[in-house]
Amino acid sequence: MVGPFGACSGLATRTGREKPALFFLAVAELVFGVLVFEDLMAILLLAALTALTAGSLSATTLLRTTARLGGFVIALLGLGLLAIPRLIRYLVRLNSPEKLLVAVVGLCCALTLLAQALGYSVALGAFVAGSLVVESGASKH
């Protein structure tokens, strides 16, 4: 069941590596938006299928899962947008690529562990970490 979701995300990533000119088009934003939406829907589907196999699928369970997921993403992005871009810009000003690399990898690991501890996929945590780092505007470094 997870295979089609991974295949769609993998196909878009592969296309981006093989044809980088494609991502300079205005369509690129739409493609990445669809991928994010697809990843979030995959989490909801996995939660619903898990509840269905346990025999306890109900509208309230699905609504509660949706609310938890939305709250998690909003809280992580909201709090992260206040601190992470500033931290990354500060590290770029230090002109130390090693410190920047360690901080970004550490952030990615921390958010994946947080996502996993709350019952979500590690890909969601890594995606949010990447989004926060890119928001700093220092992604060229």
Image (cartoon, rainbow, N blue to C red):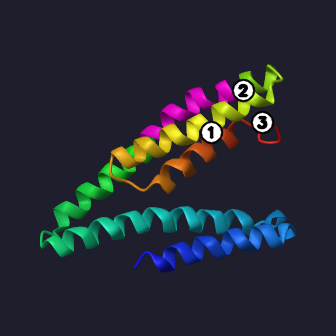
Name which residue lies at 38% across and 51% down.
Answer: 70
User: Image quadrant for the C terminus?
Assistant: top right
Give the residue pinned by disc 2.
99
Tag 2: amino acid: Lys
Q: Which residues are magenta?
A: 75-88
Q: Nearer the viewer, residue 139 or 108?
A: 108
Q: Nearer the viewer, residue 43 or 98?
A: 98
**Left or right: where does residue 35 sit relative to residue 56?**
right
Give the residue pinned by disc 1.
105
Determine the secondary structure under disc 2: helix
Residue 53 in picture, x, y percent from top left: 19, 75
Tell me the distance, in whole angstroms, between the alpha carbons under discs 3 and 2.
Answer: 14 Å
Residue furthest out toward the left: 55
Name which residue lies at 19% across and 61% down.
Answer: 61
Name which residue lies at 12% across and 69% down.
Answer: 56
Residue furthest out toward the right: 21
Give the residue pinned by disc 3.
138
Q: Earlier in the sequence, mark 3 or mark 2?
A: 2
> Up-down: is 61 above or below 109?
below
Determine the secondary structure under disc 3: loop
Residue 83 in picture, x, y percent from top left: 58, 26
Residue 121 in picture, x, y percent from top left: 42, 56
